[in-house]
Image (cartoon, rainbow, N blue to C red):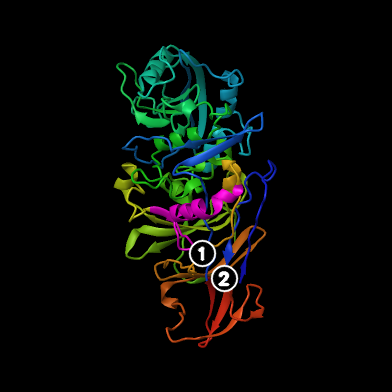
Amino acid sequence: MMIERLFFSDLSKEIRGKALMCVLWCSLFAFLFPLSAYASSVRLKSYRMSDGTVHTFKTRSAGARRVLPRTRKDWDSERIYKAPVILMSYSDRDFLPEHDLQFYKDMLGKKGFNPGCGQGCVADYFRDQSLGKFNLEFDVVSVKTTYGCKITTNSAIREAIIKAAEYFDYSDSDYDWDGNGEADVVIVIFAGYGGNQIDDLSVGCYWPETDYIYINDLPVEAYSCSNEIWVNDASIGIGTLCHELSHILGLPDLYPKMGDDFSVVDEWDLMDGGCFSGDGWCPPNFSIQERELLGWATAETLEASQYIADMPVYDGSAKAYKIVNPSNPNECYYIENRQWEGWDYMLPGHGMLITHVNYSSSAWRSNIVNGDTSNRRYDYLHADGITFNEYYEYYNDVVASSYGEDGRNLRLRTTAYPYTNDEGVESTIPSLFGTTITDLTENDRLLSFRFRDAADGISTVSSDAEPVAYFDIQGRRISEPGKGMFIVKYSNGITKKIIR
């Protein structure tokens, strides 16, 4: 039994986010702890300006259509799926000189192009997620609209799509992915800030979004749009564009669409806060559930008791397992080995990631997967028994004030895991439909564990068992412990991990 904790007093460019590591290993369970911390009920991004001052601004997740297309699985790995792209400047706002036509051609389609810590361009991202089944190319033009940049309707986007018809034949079969006679999507990247950046500079600006559109005599089905820069004038990268384009594929938002909560799985998934990972340049891999929906990969179902040795890293392999509810085939737990590699380089942590999914086709298509706070249909197993937002509140109240004003570094510096409150709460793990995962080990980024089906059962501590010995996490016997993590041996021979 062991707990590993890493603390960083500073964050360098070289480590780029690897500070958020903590995996709890114990003889019964080991799960990844999803954590991010922000100083507001919205996401924070912060940058140090050239004069040394820190500029912090807030972001909200971008908008999306209410009804999504049906996901499809009939992708042709031999086909090039093309999309028209419009760089839309406003009457009062142009793109920065460094963000010219060539920059966006490279960002969208030049193999390996990525000024951040990601693995390449937009086309690279989708090629990797689809394991070669979805290959994109982009035709890019520039258009200037007559509207100003302070606009909250899609009037400027409509005008830009109409103007771009001078360059694009929207009826081109290369743009028509599903054969219905219309371009599946027109991508619009607009100059300046996005309205989802809660900052004085971005007030009144348009939000990144995806939606259907109807324009007389133009065979265009939908558009996806994102903006050019953060409020420090740095490029927002590829994350938001990949997020929005994923809606065209039928993938829903995973952040709550209603209520006060602003995140569920945060930067672990592109369809929540992952579009911000690596300042937008390193969005994480699609989850195995998202890849299953698109026909790009399939998780192996665990049924009979067995020992899994050397489960490979998820990035690159897409190897995953799932435990299906015998009473409901739409509900399952997915198991992934997520490590700081490839597109997962900027994940908040690493180790075994277990995701609970209660799939409903209507909830997915209606884009309300996590709309019900009492019934999250997509969430991670929280080894400490608290949700993302509960930890956020704890961090905000107890920890955040001690780590300075730089919101990005604050988020990437962490406090001791696992979370415990002042009264001392033992970590609890939800039931995996009566099955168990034990004997988890990690060796050179490979995971091994023992799966037991429901018929094997699991030992529990009886209510009349008494503690007979205490040990620290190194296995050394100690007197009755104070606060922290320790091991208790009970009179019936059972040992348990305790957090006080």
Given residues 186 and 431, the one toward you in this image is 431
Up the image or down, 91 lies above or below 266; here it is: above
Q: Three-letter amino acid code at disc 2?
A: Lys
Given residues 272 and 197, the one toward you in this image is 197
Which residue is located at x 40 percent, y 31 percent?
A: 209
Q: Earlier in the sequence, mark 1 or mark 2?
A: 1
Residue highlighted by disc 2: 483
Q: Is residue 395 magenta?
A: yes
Bounds of the magenta segment: 378-403
Residue highlighted by disc 1: 420
Up the image or down, 329 lies above or below 104; here it is: below
Q: Quadrant of residue 182?
A: top left
Relative image position of residue 328 (x, y in whole percent): 32, 61
Q: Are marks 1 and 2 in contact (CB under 8 Å)?
A: yes
| Circle 1 Cα neighbour tier, 10 Å, few/some/many (<14 / 14–19 / ≥20) | many
| Circle 2 Cα neighbour tier, 10 Å, few/some/many (<14 / 14–19 / ≥20) | few
Relative image position of residue 38 (x, y in whole percent): 51, 46
Q: CA distance from mark 1 to mark 2?
A: 9 Å
Q: Is residue 74 magenta?
A: no
Q: Is residue 474 left or right of residue 195?
A: right
Relative image position of residue 412 (x, y in whole percent): 60, 47
* Marking on residue 493: none
